Structure formats: structure tokens, C-alpha cells
Amino acid sequence: MELTERVRRWRDRGEREHFRGHAVHVFRRETDGPFVVMLHGFPSSSYDWAPVLEALTEPSVLAFDFLGFGLSDKPREHRYTLGWQADLTTELVNRHSGGRPVFLVAHDMGTSVGTELMARDLEGRLGFELAGVLLFNGSIVLDAASLTPSQKLLRGPLGPLAARLSSRRVFDQQFGSVFSSSHPLEREEADDQWSLICHNGGRSLGHKLIFYLSERIALADRWHGAIRDWRDLQLAWGLEDPVATTAVLEALRRLHPGVPVAELPGLGHYPQLEDPSRMAAVIGAAI
């Protein structure tokens, strides 16, 4: 499937860089403002940030596609761990931050990459200055979340078959189901997202990419500890999220009592797509 016109425009605003033998798509914007790194979720890509960046013009921004996602390489035999993605994040930050303090904004799967970076910072081995973190709508406390049927299927023994049989019809239903009723998934956005998933053979890779959910269980003590102990943490939450539900938010509040939370009534799992200007305002206030 060909990339849509809007995705091609986004591609042309970025560059291809290499890390450990693989090419990744990187978007950069330089301003006089703070340096913000944006981490996307599953199954999407840094393209999720494009609408927000139209409204959020102040900061310098680094946004990229994790390996296996969007416009980056999608090697079939790679083991897609969040530790590897955290290493990629660290390398790109050190290439482009110029030593500036980093403010991290992370969504969905990206929140667990973020908590790994926070854990490394607590250990004194991060390698850059992490000045602040904003996490939103990720199933960080997995046992409080409500996974979609597709996520459950991809994680199970039939995952490889489910990935091979994935279709546009199933994608529209499952991806659309995590948007709020007042901000439904638009057809053009669905076209964009599906073209990015299919790009470079990625359509049948979902069972490998979803390994991060197993890591959320195996590394829960480490990552929940980072939520509990890391200093300048903030949260934002679309309260109509059917996956990373308000039960997840309450679990995070128990881990880190008093954590600042920007509650977003009327928004679902993708606040940055559902109401970009509102999410831009939340990010702007956080940084």
C-alpha cells in the first residue's frame, strides 16, 4: 500500500538516520525554546505528533519512529524490546540535544520507554539531563488496563497468524474503538495510519511489536518504581480511554501520590489526534 499524501509530506519533513545498522525516521525542529522529545505509542508512529506540532510552536522538538514502526526499518527477525528503543532514544537525544536539558512527552507504549529512561536516570546512568516528564494514556499498570481484542489475540499463541491475517476492516474497527465518541476516528486519519502500518512490510509484524506488553509485566517492579521515585513527573489523561482507563490513572496516583494530572474529559486514548490544540496547551503548560 502506498503512503498517503499527508504522510508523504510528513516523511519529507524528516530525515533517515542509522542506529545499530537500522534506519529510523527522525523529525527535528529547532527553536530557541526548550528541547522536547516526543515518544509515540503502538501501533502508530511519530506522525501522531504532527497535528500537535502545528499548535505547539515554541519548543525545539525531536520526534522519531521507533524501530518497527511508521517510516523506520521493520526487520522481521529483530527482538523488539523497550530497552532497545530506550537505547535508540538516548542515542538520538545525544546526537541532537546539544547538551540541553530534555523534557520528555510520551504516549501509550512510549510511556514504558519513558519509565525505562527514568529508571536509568535514578541509577545515575542515563547519559543526558532529564528535566521533566509528561506521560499520558499508557497502560503502565497493565493489570488495571482493558486491552483490546486485537491486543489480546496478538499476544497469544495465535499472534503470528492474527498478524498475517490483519486487514483494513479489522484495523478500522479496533483502532477506531479507542477514540472517544465525541472525537471519532476520521477516515483520512485512518488512511494515514493504515498506510504507515503497512509501509515496508509492517502489516504482519504486530505480534512481535506487542512484546512490550509482556515487558510491562516482567519489568513492573522497575518501571513502577521509577513512577514512584522520579521527581518531576506529570500526567495527562483522556478520561474516556477504554484501554488505559481511569483505573490505570488511579493506580498511577497511588504509586506517586500528589503527581500533577491534567484530566481531559471527553477525550479517549489518542488526545493528540482527537483534540490537538487542547493537547498542545497541556504540553505547553507542562514544559
Image (spheres, helix red, strand yellow):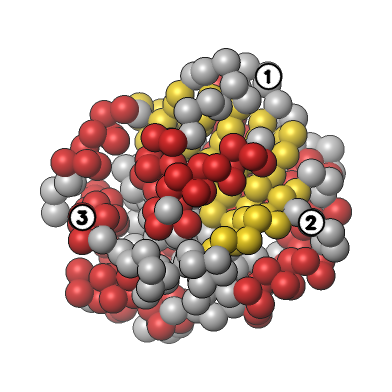
Towards the viewer: 21 or 216? 216
Q: CA distance from mark 3 to mark 2?
A: 36 Å
What x and y, as percent, mark residue 109?
Answer: 54, 58
Which of the 4 quarters of the picture holds residue 263? bottom right
Point 84% across, 38% down: residue? 124
Position of 224 relative to 29 (above/below): below
What x and y, as percent, mark residue 138?
Answer: 58, 63
Position of 285 relative to 211 (above/below): above
Towards the viewer: 166 or 145? 145
Residue ID for mark 2: 259
Residue 99's label in the rendered image is 1
Point 79% across, 56% down: residue? 259
Q: Amino acid at mark 3?
A: Glu
Position of 154 relative to 6 (above/below): below
Q: Say whether marks 3 and 2 touch (CB < 8 Å).
A: no
Local packing at callout 3 (Cα closer than 10 Å; few below 14, some 14-19, many 20+) is few
Q: Amino acid at mark 2?
A: Val
Q: CA distance from mark 3 to mark 1?
A: 39 Å
Residue ID for mark 3: 188
Which of the 4 quarters of the picture holds residue 140? bottom right
Towards the viewer: 172 or 95? 172
Local packing at callout 2 (Cα closer than 10 Å; few below 14, some 14-19, many 20+) is some
What x and y, as percent, mark residue 241?
Answer: 51, 71
Instruction: Identify the secondary structure beneath mark 1.
Output: loop
Point 74% across, 34% down: residue? 131
Q: Say whether marks 2 and 1 touch (CB < 8 Å).
A: no
Towards the viewer: 271 or 93? 271
Q: Amino acid at mark 1?
A: Gly
